C-alpha cells in the first residue's frame, strides 16, 4: 500500500501516550461488524481508522464478527465483509467470531451470579422498560431482584437447557436502579431466542446482549483500544463494569468517535436492507448504494475511499459530510490513471458528404494528455460518424458554439466540419446531418488558417461498438439524508437513466471494472454484472466537474 499521510487525531494521541507511559507495549485494535448486512462507506471510516492506527505503531488489528443475534445474521454477510475489507487493502491479524466465545461468556455470567451481581428476572420486556424509569425519575426494583444465588444458578442453567420460551426470562446485571445513567439500571445480559445461529447452529438458545458481549470479546482478544461510535459513550460505564466484575485479565479502553454521515445518503444497514428487499435498488451492490460493494461496482477505487477516509478525519462531534467530497477523491485518483477515450451516449448520425466513400483513415490521439506516459492510439475516421444529439441545435441561442446549420466545429482529434443540411423524419425529429470537412484542418498538422469556438467528440459509425450507459444521480433527494424519518419518500425517481450509444473501437478489449474517462462526459466503469461479450455496459462514476471545492 502507498505511504499515507498520518491521520493525527485525539485517538492517535491517546495511543501515543499509552505507548510512551508503558501502559501498553503493543496496541491491538479491532473492526467488529455485525454480519447483518453489507459494509458501507461509514464502516470504511472505522476500518481505515483501526487498521492504520495499529499499522502506524506496529500493532495488530482483528476482524471480529459481532454475531450475537441469530435472527439477523447470515454467512452471506460474513463473506461479503471479508471481501470488502480485503478489497479496501487491509489485512487482519486475527479473524474471530464473537459466537466462538459463547461458552466463556456463559461462564462469566455464572461468575456474576455467584458474586450476587446478576439475577434471573421474569418481567416482560414491557415491564422491564416501565420499571426502568426515566432520566428524571428513578427506576423501580424488579420483584425478582433478590432471588438467591442458588435459585439464579438453577434458573440460568435451565434457560440454557431450553426449558423456557423466548421472552419468558432474562438474566440481568444487579447494579443500581437509581443510577442517573439508564444503562446502569440492571441492564439485560442474556435473553432467550430459540433460533438457529449461522455459526453455532442450534447449540444455544440463550444469547448475550451487546453491552455484555462486546467488552468480553475485546478483553478476550486483548484489544487495547476499542474504538466505537459516539452513541456508545453512555454505555462506557457499563462496558467498564462488565470488564471489572467479570474479572477479565485484559482491560481494554473504549474510545468513541463521531460516525460518518453523508448528504443525500442513508447509512443504516436496516434501511439499506429495506432498499434491497423492497426492490428499490438492484441489490446490495447497486452502483447507487453507499455500500463498499456498490461503490466498487460504480467504479470507485480503494485508494479513493482511503484518501477520503483520511481527509474527513476523526472527531468527537457529529457532522454531515458533503457527498461530493467523496466524488472529489475518485476524480483525483482517476485523473492520471484512466485512459481518455470517446463515447457518444445519445447518437446523431453525421454524413461527411465530401469524404471519399469506402475510405477509412487512422488518426492519432493521446491516451491521456495530462499523463504523456500513457502513450497514443489510432482512431478510425470515415465518411459516417456519430456525434452527441446535444451537440447540434437547429435554432441555437446566442453563444452556442457547437453545431448548427452553417456553423463549423472541430471534431476532437480529427477535422473541422461544417453543417450544410438537416434531415428529419416524418415527425420532424432530426435524424441525420449532412456536413463537409476541410482536409486542411487535420488535427496535429498545426493548421492556423482559421479558428472555431467549439470542439465536439464523435465516433466512427463503421467501427464503433454499441454500448449502454448507466447515468446515476443521488438516490435520495433529501439534503438532510439519514435523519429524515420516511426516507423512502425521499427516493429520487430519476436516480438512474439508461442510454444506448457507442464507444470507439479501441475499447473492444475492455474488461469488467476497467475505468475510462469519456471525453466531456466524465469517468465510467465497465459494469461487472451486465456487460456481455456482445455489449459493454458502463456505469458513470462521476461527471468531470463539480462545484465542490476542498479548502
Ligand atoms: P448500522 O447502523 O449501519 O447497522 P452499526 O454501527 O450497527 O451500523 P456494525 O456492524 O455494528 O454496524 O459496525 C461495525 C463498526 O463500524 C462499529 O465499530 C461501528 O462503530 C462502525 N461504524 C458503523 N457505521 C459507521 C459510520 N457511519 N461511521 C463510522 N463508523 C461506523
Ligand atoms: Mg449494529
Image (spheres, helix red, strand yellow):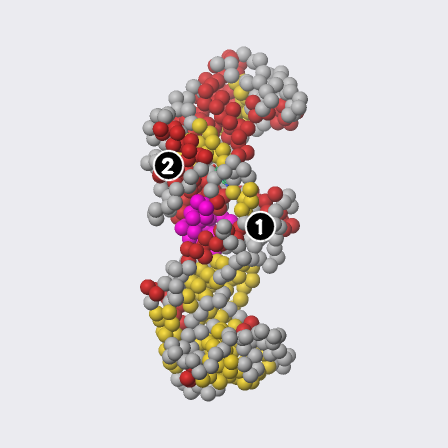
* Residue at 48% from the left image edge and 67% from the top image edge: 520
Quickly name the residue at label 1: 264
Question: Looking at mark 1, is its residue's CB closer than 8 Å to ligand 1?
Answer: no
* Residue at 55% from the left image edge and 34% from the top image edge: 231
Residue placed most toward the observer, 133 or 129: 133
| Mark 1 neighbour density, 10 Å: few (under 14) some (14–19) many (20 or more) | many
Secondary element under disc 2, as helix, strand or loop, is: helix
Indicate left or right for 134 with 447 as reference.
right
- Disc 1 and disc 2: Cα gap in Å? 32 Å
Numbered mark located on residue 482 in the image: none
Q: Is residue 539 magenta?
A: no
Q: Is residue 108 above or below residue 355?
A: above
Residue 317 in percent (x, y) is at 54, 37
Residue placed most toward the observer, 245 or 440: 440
Camera sees residue 455: yes
Residue 49 in percent (x, y) is at 43, 40
Q: Is residue 373 above or below residue 201?
A: below
Question: Which SS does the magenta portion mostly show?
Answer: helix
Residue 539 in percent (x, y) is at 48, 60
Quickly name the residue at label 2: 54
* Residue at 65% from the left image edge and 25% from the top image edge: 134
| Mark 2 neighbour density, 10 Å: few (under 14) some (14–19) many (20 or more) | many
First of labels 1, 2 by sequence position: 2
Camera sees residue 512: no
* Residue at 46% from the left image edge and 38% from the top image edge: 33
Secondary element under disc 1, as helix, strand or loop, is: loop
Q: Is residue 299 magenta?
A: yes
Residue placed most toward the observer, 147 or 330: 330
Residue 17 in percent (x, y) is at 39, 29
Residues tagged 1 and 2 counted as in contact (Cβ below 8 A): no
Q: Is residue 220 above or below residue 407?
A: above
Per the rendered image, the range of residues in magenta is 289-311
Amino acid at each position: 500500500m502507498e505511504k499515507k499521510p498520518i491521520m493525527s487525531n485525539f485517538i492517535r494521541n491517546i495511543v501515543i501516550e499509552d505507548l510512551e507511559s508503558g501502559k501498553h507495549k503493543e496496541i491491538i485494535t479491532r473492526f467488529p461488524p455485525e454480519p447483518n448486512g453489507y459494509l458501507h462507506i461509514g464502516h470504511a471510516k472505522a476500518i481505515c481508522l483501526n487498521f492504520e492506527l495499529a499499522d502506524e505503531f506496529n500493532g495488530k488489528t482483528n476482524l471480529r464478527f459481532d454475531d450475537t443475534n441469530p435472527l439477523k445474521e447470515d454467512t452471506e454477510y460474513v463473506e461479503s465483509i471479508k471481501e470488502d475489507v480485503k478489497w479496501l487493502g487491509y489485512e487482519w491479524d486475527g479473524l474471530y467470531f464473537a459466537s466462538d466465545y459463547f461458552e466463556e461468556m456463559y461462564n462469566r455470567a455464572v461468575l456474576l451470579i455467584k458474586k450476587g451481581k446478576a439475577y434471573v428476572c421474569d418481567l416482560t420486556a414491557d415491564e422491564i422498560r416501565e420499571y426502568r424509569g426515566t432520566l428524571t425519575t428513578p427506576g423501580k426494583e424488579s420483584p425478582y431482584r433478590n432471588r438467591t444465588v442458588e435459585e439464579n444458578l438453577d434458573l440460568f442453567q435451565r434457560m440454557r437447557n431450553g426449558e423456557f420460551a423466548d421472552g419468558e426470562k432474562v438474566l440481568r446485571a444487579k447494579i443500581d436502579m437509581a443510577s442517573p445513567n439508564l444503562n446502569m439500571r440492571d441492564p439485560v445480559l442474556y435473553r432467550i431466542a430459540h433460533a438457529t445461529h449461522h455459526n453455532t447452529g442450534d447449540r444455544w438458545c440463550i444469547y448475550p446482549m451487546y453491552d455484555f458481549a462486546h467488552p468480553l470479546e475485546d478483553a478476550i482478544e486483548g484489544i487495547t483500544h476499542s474504538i466505537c461510535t459516539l452513541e456508545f459513550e453512555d454505555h462506557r460505564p457499563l462496558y467498564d463494569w462488565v470488564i471489572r466484575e467479570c474479572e477479565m485479565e485484559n482491560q481494554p479502553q473504549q474510545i468513541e468517535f463521531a460516525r460518518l454521515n453523508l448528504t443525500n445518503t442513508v447509512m443504516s444497514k436496516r434501511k439499506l436492507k429495506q432498499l434491497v428487499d423492497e426492490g428499490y435498488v438492484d441489490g446490495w451492490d447497486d452502483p447507487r448504494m453507499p455500500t463498499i460493494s456498490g461503490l466498487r461496482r460504480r467504479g470507485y477505487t480503494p485508494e479513493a475511499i482511503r484518501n477520503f477516509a483520511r481527509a474527513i478525519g476523526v472527531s468527537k462531534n457529529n457532522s454531515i459530510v458533503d457527498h461530493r467530497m467523496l466524488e472529489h477523491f475518485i476524480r483525483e485518483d482517476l485523473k492520471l490513471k484512466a485512459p481518455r477515450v470517446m463515447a457518444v451516449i445519445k447518437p446523431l448520425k453525421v454524413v461527411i458528404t465530401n469524404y471519399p466513400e469506402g475510405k477509412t483513415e487512422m488518426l492519432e490521439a493521446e491516451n491521456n494528455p495530462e499523463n504523456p506516459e500513457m502513450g497514443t492510439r489510432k482512431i478510425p475516421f470515415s465518411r459516417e460518424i456519430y456525434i452527441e444529439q446535444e451537440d447540434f441545435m437547429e435554432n441555437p441561442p446566442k453563444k452556442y458554439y457547437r453545431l448548427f446549420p452553417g456553423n463549423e466545429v472541430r471534431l476532437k482529434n480529427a477535422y473541422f466540419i461544417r453543417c450544410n443540411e438537416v434531415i428529419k423524419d416524418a415527425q420532424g425529429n432530426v435524424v441525420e446531418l449532412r456536413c463537409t470537412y476541410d482536409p486542411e484542418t487535420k488535427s496535429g498538422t498545426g493548421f492556423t488558417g482559421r479558428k472555431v469556438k467549439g470542439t465536439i467528440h464523435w465516433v466512427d459509425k463503421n467501427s464503433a461498438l454499441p454500448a449502454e450507459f448507466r447515468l446515476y444521480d443521488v438516490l435520495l433527494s433529501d439534503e438532510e439524508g439519514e435523519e429524515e424519518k420516511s426516507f423512502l419518500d425521499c427516493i429520487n425517481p430519476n436516480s438512474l437513466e439508461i442510454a444506448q450509444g457507442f464507444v470507439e473501437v479501441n475499447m473492444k478489449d475492455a474488461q469488467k471494472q476497467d475505468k475510462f474517462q469519456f471525453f466531456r462526459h466524465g469517468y465510467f466503469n465497465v459494469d461487472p454484472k451486465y456487460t456481455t461479450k456482445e455489449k459493454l455496459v458502463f456505469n458513470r462514476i462521476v461527471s468531470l466537474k463539480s462545484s465542490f471545492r476542498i479548502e
